[in-house]
Amino acid sequence: MINIIDELKYRGLIKDFSNETEVRKLFDSPQTIYCGFDPSASSMHLGNFVMISMLMRLQRAGHRIIAVVGGATGMIGDPSGKSKERNLLGSDALLNNTNCIKNQLEKFINLEDPKKGIIVNNYDWISKLSVLDYLREYGKYFPVNYMLSKDIVASRLQSGVSYTEFSYMILQSIDFLTLYLKEGCKIQIGGGDQWGNLTSGLELIRKTQGAETEAGCFTVPLLLDSNGKKFGKSEGGALYLDSKLVSPYKLYQFLINSGDDDAARYLKIFSFKSIPEIEAIIKDHYENLGQRIAQKALAFEVVSTIHGEAKAQEAVDMTSALFSGNVKSLSKENILELFKDLEVACPEGLLLEDLLISIKAASSKREAREFINGNSVSINGDKVTDLTKIITKADALHDEYVIIKRGKKNYYLVKLG
């Protein structure tokens, strides 16, 4: 059986170790491993899912995992990767976000047995600290020059960092020490931008529990596409895991439109298939460029993991319907998902050529007739060449919508009044 560290390296999921030899030794036996999640929004996004899938992978390998929702640290704001001070969330918004993030994590982590996995909120212990306890029991272990040397702070010195954000690494370090003492957690993982916070927590454990204490940490690279763009972002913003914010279809489209090299790399990162299975897909992909084999495998598996196989198959069917023009099988919800932005209200009883002008698919009656005669107009996927065709409710899908296609790519959604 391949060592889990070697598998994670193959998948491109390890950036930095506190000490690789020590971490490898820890992984010789089942470990308790934790990762924190910031409730800065009501939903996590595809970039966060890298860390969620890491926890899933480690749990499936036989390790106990702890997901920490930052109900306390979220009140402060992590300066990592930020060029300026965050706006602090109100207590109601933060509570809502914390509950939403917890609910999302519960979908992916096996919580049937506390010996396999738990979700905790760091507000439960940090909120009990008085200012004096915070300073005396923890602050004394953090020399200011040590904190200033961390990239997460150093990068903000010119633009300015408040003491509030400056103290974030201490609070996260308290998390690691607390989980070490209460849960036997010896390993912390986090994104590449969390290196300073992770190592600070490790230092706190060793300063308070002894220099030889067994503990370690490692980071996962922040994902960038081949153009250096941050992974998980689309033109419309973050690709949230909440289907109400980003539909499974939109997520599927983002992934299936990945570049060839990106798709092969992302498949290693997100897929739970074995290494030989992944290698076979990648080999097939490069031998048949243009068939988007890696993209299809990637998109289907990621959407299945996040939203379920039924939603992934629905995204496949919607994509196929749009490509083939066979739109009659689409549900009303699918139609609105695909064409809502193109919707135009029209009365029934219009001559097809007048309808084409009304929806701006043609600029004149002459042009409309040319399109119809030229076999370039279809109604609900069927070509129409009848110049006397009148659009009625009988043409409507779900008694409401008519999908007009002109040419190869021009779609229009007509809502019959």
Image: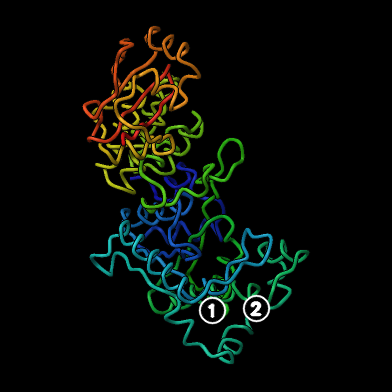
134 relative position to 34: left or right = right
Q: Where in the figure is residue 358, as x and y percent of width and height?
A: 43, 26
Q: Where in the figure is residue 209, as x and y percent of width and height?
A: 51, 80
**Tag 1 and tag 2, C-beta contact below 8 Å:** no
Q: Amino acid at mark 2?
A: Phe
Q: Earlier in the sequence, mark 1 or mark 2?
A: 2
Mark-to-mark CA distance, 1 and 2: 16 Å
Residue at (21, 27) in percent of width and height: 394
The residue to which callout 2 is attached is 142
Residue at (40, 7) in percent of width and height: 374
Q: Visible in this render: residue 32?
A: no
237 relative position to 328: left or right = right
Relative depth, front residue between 145 and 318 = 318
Relative depth, front residue between 250 and 194 = 250
The residue to which callout 1 is attached is 210
Q: Where in the figure is residue 12, as x and y percent of width and height?
A: 49, 44
Quadrant assignment, res 119:
bottom left
For label 2, the SS is loop
Relative depth, front residue between 387 and 99 = 387
On-image quarter of the N terminus: top left
On-image quarter of the C terminus: top left
Residue 165 — which label?
A: none
Q: Where in the figure is residue 339, as x and y percent of width and height?
A: 39, 35
82 relative position to 376: left or right = right
